[in-house]
Image (cartoon, grey):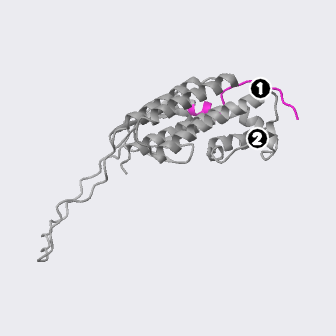
Amino acid sequence: MSFSRPPRFPTRRFLAILAILGSLTVPLGAHADVIELTNGERIVGKIKDATPTGVVIQVRGKDVRIPQARVRSIAFEAEPAPGPAAKAPAAKAPAARPQGRPLALATARPPAERPVPAHVAAALSALAGLQDATVNALPAGDYTARVEETRRQVEHALAEGPDDAHVRTAIAAALHYHAFAAYAEGVYEARGDLGAIQHDAVVAQCIPLSERVTHDAEQLKLNPQDPTVVGLLSATEGATPLRACAAQKMAEAESFARTPR
């Protein structure tokens, strides 16, 4: 089974996201905006900015930037209109406190987020550089070299601070998505065995990639279970969803690093 290399072009999902973001004409200070990510998660807050490259949403007083590749949909909810003033209920006399029972002074509060440790921030910065470098398609050899250089930078950065298994696992997954994209591209460039490109345990968790393969295979009237078809579509159409999944893992690593444990 042989394939001629199709030209790279923006996918329908990418164009749809740009269309949504480019048509935002409502005020961006809505009451309770909801962003649905490509993995099904929902983020609720106030959208502060939206461009073709990403969305900034304020969550609990902090601005969070979400790359457009991770956005599935955006919903704006208007500020509720003020209704007629409701009659205040009659004040009740405070109940008598039983003797001998201490009065609670304060309710428990969730622990505040901590700043991202410097060594984790340096590792995430290296990954962000890889994300930026792969916005446009790279030859497989250049892509692989960049992945390995980023891996060295990440390992050096993480060695400078205490180890956190959750952070390290998320960062390793982000690197793995890029390594898989470079590998698949290399097999395709070399006209190798496309059936050998398999979704391993980590890559299988990249839902946007699985959805892209299934969708494109059905559009082309091909069998989405055929290893050769899966390999072809992973190599030619997998870069964007794999980068989106890498960005998601980077966000997870940052969240883990900020959460006190």
Label tally: 2
Q: Which of the 4 image quarters holds residue 221?
A: top right
Q: Which of the 4 image quarters holds residue 113?
A: top left
Q: Which of the 4 image quarters holds residue 224?
A: top right
Kindly report which numbered mark, 1 or 2, lies closer to the viewer in this rendering: 1
Question: Could you tell me how far apart the alpha carbons at marks 1 and 2 are, in whole angstroms?
Answer: 16 Å
Position of residue 232 measured from the top left corner of the image (x, y, whole percent) = 77, 35
Q: Nearer the viewer, residue 108 or 66?
A: 108
Which residue is rendered at x = 73% and y = 28% of the image?
186
Which residue is denoted by mark 1 in the rendering? 189
Look at label 1 and name its amino acid: Glu
Which residue is denoted by mark 2 in the rendering? 230
Residue 5, above or below 199: above
Which residue is rendered at x = 49% and y = 31% of the image?
54
Mark 2 falls on what kind of element?
helix
Part of the protein shown in magenta = 1-17
Position of residue 63 measured from the top left corner of the image (x, y, whole percent) = 38, 35
The kind of secondary structure the magenta stretch mainly shows is loop
Q: Residues within 10 Å of mark 1 (few under 14, many from 20)?
A: some
Residue with the most extreme right position: 1
Q: Residues within 10 Å of mark 2 (few under 14, many from 20)?
A: many
